Image: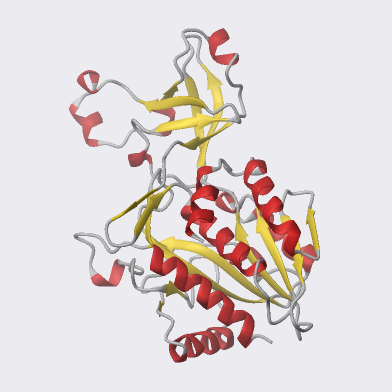
Amino acid sequence: MLDLLKSLCAASGVSGDEGAVRDIIRNITEPFAESVRTDAMGNLIVEKRGKSRAAKKIMVCAHMDEVGVVVTDITDDGYVKFACAGGIDRRVLIGKRVYFGAAKTPGVVGCKAVHLTSGAEREAVPKVDDLYIDIGAGTREDAEKLLQIGDTGAFDATAIEFGNGYLAAKAIDDRLGCAVMLELLKSELPQDVTFVFTVQEEVGARGAQAASFSVAPEIALVLEATTAADLPGVSEGKTVCKVGGGAVIPFMDGGAMYDRALWDRLTKAAAEREIPWQTKRYISGGTDAQAVQRSRAGVATLAIAAPVRNLHSPLCVGKISDFDAVLATARLFLEITQ
């Protein structure tokens, strides 16, 4: 799964512009699926037959999109002004490389030169409106030959393995969930499952809302990456979860309260199988679950996530053993919901 994850992370799929990632996933899924379709929102919906028909309709989903930037203006001297697509911490932007479109037009995020700033400015984090992207163009006309308003840009970062089984890459949130679903699709399943690779999660779970309405699941599993704040200076109660601690099975986050019966069954089964797992110790974040569980008359929903540091940044950090634990726990979920 690691090589698959790296290839998915390398692709560009900023919210609203997920086509390149969707094409990769579609090509992988088609040999293993009963049917594959793309809906009007851009969600990829894949039906997979299992050993038996599901007692209740099961949907497993993960989002294809990643945080990035979107061009909002081009200055007369060829600089690109932008907005963030998704929640990006402004502190990580300055000096970072981005690329735009299939041509991978490169750019560097910049701001006012430090020697021109006041003391107060040096103490504050610049607003996005005060930043720009330098694409090496001298005029608006030069810049418009390379990109246009509305184009999306992704962080330019190479995935690296380092330390004791760690991976740093962009877009682990949520290409990890996509990679886990692809591994499940390639295997024999205990029951029929509908897999949904969603769009626009980072801007409000918009794809999941549409997909949940059309698929009409009775039980749903959301696969994700979640914030791990196990860092120097962070108190134990605010770490949320820990990299290396196994799959995260939250009972609640900022957008959803998960089905208690499913949570009890899965955590008990994971403990019995000796699959490493943990839960959140701080309520934060949100996932596609907030849209899924409220669809139609309601859906019994659970989430499984990988703990990841530096979420929504050019280089997220996670541990490969945790990714494997997410896959093992997702397989177990499909067993206990038969």
How are the residues colored? secondary structure
Classify the position of the C terminus by image quarter. bottom right
| Left or right for 212, reference 160 | right
Q: Is residue 16 visible?
A: no
- Residue placed at 77% from the left, 84% from the top? 52
Task: Indicate the quadrant where residue 113 lies.
Answer: top left
**Numbered circles on residues, count:** 0
Q: Which of these two is toward me, 5 or 264?
A: 5
Tell me, yes or no, if residue 245 can be seen here: yes
Horizontal side of residue 178 vs 185, given as left or right: left
Tell me the residue at 58%/88% (across/down): 261
| Residue 21 pos. (x, y %) | 62, 46
Left or right of residue 190: residue 169:
left
Percent of width and height locating residue 220: 66, 73
Residue 301 on image: x %, y %: 62, 75
Name above or below for residue 202 compared with residue 263: above
In this view, 330 is above or below 168:
below
- Of 36 and 145, which appears nearest the observer? 36
At horizontal 43% and vertical 44% (from top left) the residue drawn is 88
Q: Where is residue 138 in the image (x, y as percent from the top left)?
A: 46, 8
